[in-house]
Amino acid sequence: MSELRPTETGLKSGLDRDRNRGDDAIPRHVAVIMDGNGRWAERQGLARTEGHRAGLEAVRKIVRAADDLGIGFLTLFAFSSENWNRPKQEVDLLMRLPEEFFELDLPEVIERGCRIRTIGRMERLPPNVRRTLENAKQRTESGTGMQLVFALSYGGRAEIVDAARRLLREHEQGQLDPDGLDEKMFAAHLDLPELPDVDLLIRTGREWRISNFLLWQLAYAEIHVTDCMFPDFGREELEAAIADFHARERRFGQTGAQVREGS
Ligand code: IPE
Ligand code: IPE
Ligand code: MG
């Protein structure tokens, strides 16, 4: 087994031991760029905001399906730092969705033993959204099942810069030896240190780009891009993405022969 297996990186986080945490059956960390809501709506002559509402239903489906499949971490890109540049009316609608999701779904999330986490610049979110998220995080703190991570007001570069800032502060206080800095220590200063590397990145909406998502954690992710617009994404599409993941040979810099020999 390779030393670089991402399923073994990241810090220990007190998760339940039963749930699949990265054997070959199910990817441990699945991250999703939930794209295509606007085009889905426009194709049907609907307002883009209708697409976002339909996207919320797809979030419900993917959360249930991912949990049923035993995925350890599901990270959903819900709102990027760049999405603040959209028209105000669209941003306002998008900012209402976290409340709509948790109002209806928090009991089920709790029942499932999921734990809600967030990454991104929370301080930019309206106070009511922050409150909703804080409440969901608190109420699921003891959840030992799937960790459901919402990336909101999130940008991968900003997360890396924030980590660098935290490290510089520690250095200023004499708590950090620059020669001791390595990848593990750097990763421990990211927004959610226990978030492991992504195994499978899914992007809906047929765009082949990363859009500033999880730049650090995606280093060795397998990437599945689908034509499916996010509102049409459900259990079947998630299973297809996982089947695609299984068809890949993850080499982590080694040769195919080395991987097959298990050296
Ligand atoms: C993704 O769908 C949702 C967010 C970015 C919040 P889009 O709104 O980007 O949909 P398209 O790409 O315009 O179709
Ligand atoms: C990425 O989608 C952000 C989210 C899914 C939240 P975008 O639609 O904003 O990405 P770009 O701008 O087309 O790359
Ligand atoms: Mg888009």
Image: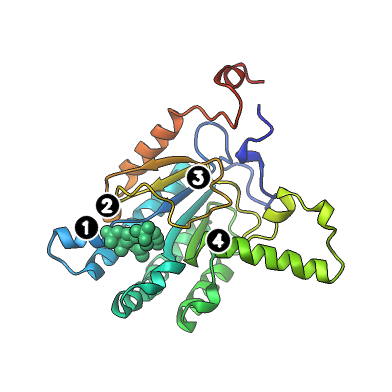
Secondary element under disc 4, as helix, strand or loop, is helix
Give the labeled residue for mark 4: 157
Residue 237 position within the rendered picture, expressed as x and y whole percent measured from the top left: 32, 42
Give the labeled residue for mark 2: 229
Give the labeled residue for mark 3: 71
Q: Amino acid at mark 4?
A: Arg
Labels 3, 2: front one: 2
Q: Between disc 4 and disc 2, whose residue precedes? A: 4
In the image, what residue occupies the spot 33% across and 49% down? Answer: 207
Q: Between disc 3 and disc 4, whose residue precedes? A: 3
Labels 4, 1: front one: 4
Labels 3, 4: front one: 4
Secondary element under disc 1, as helix, strand or loop, is helix
Secondary element under disc 2, as helix, strand or loop, is loop
Q: Between disc 4 and disc 1, whose residue precedes? A: 1
Do the CB atoms of the residues marked 2 and 1 lie less than 8 Å apart?
Answer: yes
In the image, what residue occupies the spot 35% across and 75% down? Answer: 91
Q: Quadrant of residue 257?
A: top right
Give the labeled residue for mark 1: 40
Residue 182 position within the rendered picture, expressed as x and y whole percent measured from the top left: 75, 49
Do the CB atoms of the residues marked 4 and 1 lie less than 8 Å apart?
Answer: no
